[in-house]
Image: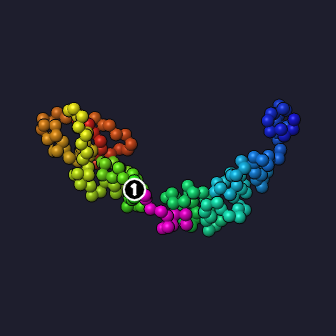
Amino acid sequence: YVCDYEYLDCSNDWDETDCPCRPDREWTCANGDCVQAGDDCDGYQDCRDNSDESECVTCRVFQCEDGKCLNKYQLCDGRDDCVGGEDEEPGCPKCDPRFQWTCEDLSCILKSWVCDGYDDCPDGSDEKNCSLADSLQFASKAREQTILGARKYSKLLSSVNGGNGNSKLNRTRSRKQPSKGGLYSFA
């Protein structure tokens, strides 16, 4: 069967070559290629010739000054997807203060990552101006104590372990390399 979209009946695929796009499932690109229906005017180039993005009457989310359409994930993501950068204008929403912290470079991180001994902000601003109270967290369990920022406060750690200098250092955090410390366990 020619253009049945199901089976390759001919050994050279002739029966499925140059078939029209299925109007119920596909959109026809200007060059004749077929893409999934609904992929036109979505901010992504699905057709090799970009015809699925070239004649959009209105963009579904955002249109750059040069006519390029963007989806919601491309807005305020820290990258200029529009040639003029208008998708990253000052009107972008700020970090959600309920659970995020704003870095000096205006990127967002989780509040729990501030003053934890790891540079989570690209500029390291989450580890600046941290007090001793911010940098230490104790969680006692039998004879073990967990301490954040351990290397920064080695004298305090010596007193926590009874001043005998026999602390064993075991790393328990793996998200990123610590900037000035990190999460360590002492037995």
Q: Residue at x 82, y 41 (%)?
A: 17
The spot of residue 131 in percent (x, y) is: 23, 54
For residue 87: magenta? yes
Asked if 65 appears above or below 139 in the picture, the reply is below
Q: Is residue 98 visible?
A: yes
Dominant SS of magenta comes to loop
> Can you give x and y, in whole percent of width and height, for residue 125 in the image?
34, 57
* Location of residue 16 in the rendering, given as x and y in whole percent from the top left corner: 82, 39
- Taking the spot 25% from the left edge, 40% from the top edge, the residue there is 139
Quadrant showing the C terminus:
top left
Instruction: Judge whether residue 34 is colored magenta.
Output: no
Vertical side of 148 occupied by 41: above or below: below
Q: Looking at numbered disc 1 in the image, what kind of residue is underneath it?
A: Arg
Q: Which residues are magenta?
A: 86-96
Using residue 59 as the reference point, say whether residue 138 is left or right of it.
left
SS type, badge 1: loop
Residue drawn at (26%, 52%) of the image: 134
Callout 1: few (<14), some (14-19), or many (20+) C-alpha neighbours within 10 Å? few
Left or right, 44 with reference to 142? right
